Amino acid sequence: MKRTVAFIAAFAMLMTVCACVPSAPAVPPKQTLSLTAMDTVMTLVAYTGDEGFLPSLQEEITRCEGLFDAGDPASDVAKINAADGPVTVSDETAAVLSAAFEANRLTGGAFDCTIAPVVDLWGFDTGNYGVPGKAEVQNALLFTGGDAITLDGTVVTRAPYAAVTLGGIAKGALGDRLMALCEAAQVPAVLSLGGNIVLAGDNPHGGLWSVGVQSPTGSGIALSFSCEGGRSVVTSGGYERYFEYQGKTYHHILDPKTGFPAESDLQSVTVIGTDGAMCDALSTGLFVMGYEKAVAFAEEHDDFAYLFMTADTVYTRGVQNVELTEDGRTLITAE
């Protein structure tokens, strides 16, 4: 079995400034820190003279990973999945679960954090990839959705054989926490958390931040756009994590209704907004829906901006200065 994994779906680039304005305030020193957490490479860039600021963000990343990592027996998620009865979790984990349930409701089940029993069959969380049989998948689906996982305040109860995964929302929630820390310290920052970008504060060089979205079919950038600070930019696509078996490619975004990789005509979905956790969940759910249903959903919900990329089209709303840098697609902007 051949396995291929690509972790980073998008990255942020500072807009260049061509002329210096004498009266402009000095740009704070640029600090950079790279690390691996939540199964992805993260790059933190902050503009501050405080050399301890980025290490403090790293500590927060480690702390949050300790809550949400199903592979860590001490995490809240692992405790939920191992419990034979009700288990009390942290306020943060309860808040993320509540957001996940809301995303499930909004997307009509296209995003589902209870799909963990099916994810386990495919091995996407462990790296032990395999293609399960239809009967196995159908059996695992019996333990998902509905009341598989219930939340009452901070008390979580799972039905027999049910389990939860926060892989489709945890980085968004982490981004919200890091954004809050940056804003409290008044530190401009670009935080790349794999397919999630956090743009904290104003671009210290002036103007908007510039963001590039990776090509779903190549190693370059498919498009770039401008974005104001205080936003999370989350991209999901089947090219992010996948494996090949007997000549067929299987990506990690599973359709909760079928238990198999979503057969979506979308190559990638980018969602932009102030609620990083919801942006994260929606980017997955909208990918599962496919182009037409994703557009219809967006028409009914105007609290986020987006870029939907198919093989021949980029459909956008609320996104500034979009520039296609890869041939073969047409840009369509919603009114």
Image (cartoon, helix red, strand yellow):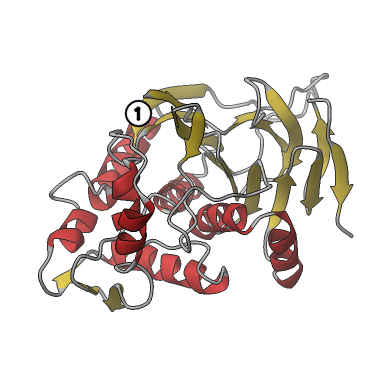
- Above or below, 146 relative to 273: below
Give the percent coordinates (x, y) of residue 237: 58, 41
State which quadrant residue 301 falls in. bottom right
**Which residue appears at 54% of the width and 51% of the height?**
262
- The residue beneath circle 1 is 36
State which quadrant residue 16 falls in. top right
Relative to the observer, which residue lies in front, 162 or 92?
A: 162
**Which residue appears at 19% of the width and 52% of the height?**
75
Relative to the observer, which residue lies in front, 272 or 223?
A: 223
Relative to the observer, which residue lies in front, 4 or 331?
A: 4
State which quadrant residue 296 falls in. bottom right
Give the percent coordinates (x, y) of residue 65: 29, 44
**Which residue appears at 80% of the width and 49% of the height?**
315
Give the percent coordinates (x, y) of residue 281: 51, 57
Q: Is residue 112 visible?
A: yes
- Above or below, 213 relative to 284: above
- Above or below, 322 relative to 25: below
Looking at the rendered image, the quarter that the C terminus falls into is bottom right
Residue type pointed to by label 1: Thr
Q: Is residue 52 visible?
A: no
Give the percent coordinates (x, y) of residue 248: 51, 32
Q: Residues within 10 Å of mark 1 (few under 14, many from 20)?
A: some
